[in-house]
Amino acid sequence: MSRLSNLSKCESMNTRRGAPFTRTLVFLAAALGPLSASAGIKCWTNDEGVRECGNAVPPQYSQKGHREISESGITVGTTARAKTKEELRIEREEAARLAALRAEEDRKIREQQTKDRVLLSTYTTESDLKLAHEGQVAAIDLRIEHTELILKQLEQSLAQLRSQAAKLERSGKSITPELKNKIARIKAQRDDSNEFIERRRMQKAELAAQFNEDLNRYRELKGLDTTAPDQTTN
């Protein structure tokens, strides 16, 4: 029987008896003589929970992790247990998640850099930025006003058609299909006009928010006071 085998058996017995492993190892190392420096002493835990040592980890325990110790009982290296398939899967998923987050952050940085370049190259002064915003708002207001005029005409036409329908009903006559179609068509146009006006008002609110964001960013890039009040009127 080899020295390491004897050492492993003795160490296992001492572990069960509660004797300190280091003291036993030092004693046995001195008694048995120096071991090969290249061989090393590897310790692992068997299926019964008992620590064993030898010059090589048995195949059945090779995936469970071990530590390598010197002849004086000092740990000089450790080998972690092999990870399970589930642990490896979780690691891959977490790595992919973090990579996706980093990619998204990089995309946002590049997007902001592009916006900054456009902002600085498009507007020479803060007043230019305000004038551009005012022009956009004015164009929307003009479309709203025009649609409101159309909406007023539609309401008048709808009132006239409904009056005609009411007269027919009072005279005991049926409303003609042509009149019904006209009423339905005018109502659809009215609804579309109201929806258009609502969308344009929402667009104005979005423009106002975007303008405030662009103005603050422009001031940051130019080193201006970001707390200065905005005198632009919408």
Image: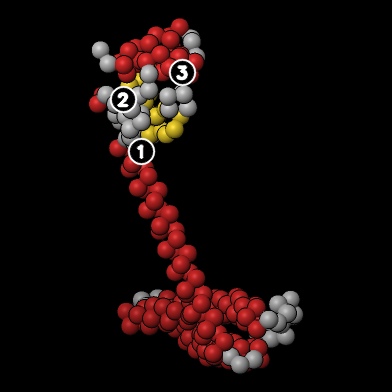
Apparent side of residue 27 relative to residue 1 in the rendered image (left or right) = right
Residue at x-position 43% and y-position 10%: 14
Residue at x-position 46% and y-position 23%: 73
Nearer the observer: mark 1 or 2; the answer is: 2
Lower position in the chain sequence, tag 3 or tag 1 = 3
Q: Amino acid at mark 1?
A: Glu
Apparent side of residue 123 relative to residue 85 in the rendered image (left or right) = right
* Residue 134 in view (yes/no): no
Crowding at dot 3, Cα within 10 Å, few <14 / some 14-19 / many 20+, comes out as some
* In front of the other: 2 or 136: 2
Apparent side of residue 124 relative to residue 93 in the rendered image (left or right) = right
Crowding at dot 1, Cα within 10 Å, few <14 / some 14-19 / many 20+, comes out as few
The residue at which mark 2 appears reads as 55
Q: Amino acid at mark 3?
A: Val
Examine the rendered structure and indicate whether residue 50 appears above or below residue 231. Answer: above
The answer to whether the residue labelled 3 contacts the one labelled 1, judged by CB atoms less than 8 Å apart, is no
Quarter of the picture containing the C terminus is: bottom right
Examine the rendered structure and indicate whether residue 45 appears above or below residue 231. Answer: above
Residue at x-position 38% and y-position 22%: 34
Examine the rendered structure and indicate whether residue 209 appears above or below residue 7. Answer: below
* Residue 150 in view (yes/no): yes
Examine the rendered structure and indicate whether residue 90 appears above or below residue 46. Answer: below
* In front of the other: 4 or 229: 4
Instruction: Say the numbered circle drawn on residue 87.
Output: 1
Lower position in the chain sequence, tag 3 or tag 2 = 3
Dividing the picture into quadrants, the one containing residue 208 is: bottom right
Instruction: Say the numbered circle drawn on residue 26.
Output: 3
Quarter of the picture containing the N terminus is: top left
Nearer the observer: mark 3 or 1; the answer is: 3
Q: Is disc 3 placed on a helix, strand or loop?
A: helix
In whole angstroms, how far apart are the C-alphas of marks 3 and 2? 16 Å
The answer to whether the residue labelled 1 contacts the one labelled 2, judged by CB atoms less than 8 Å apart, is no
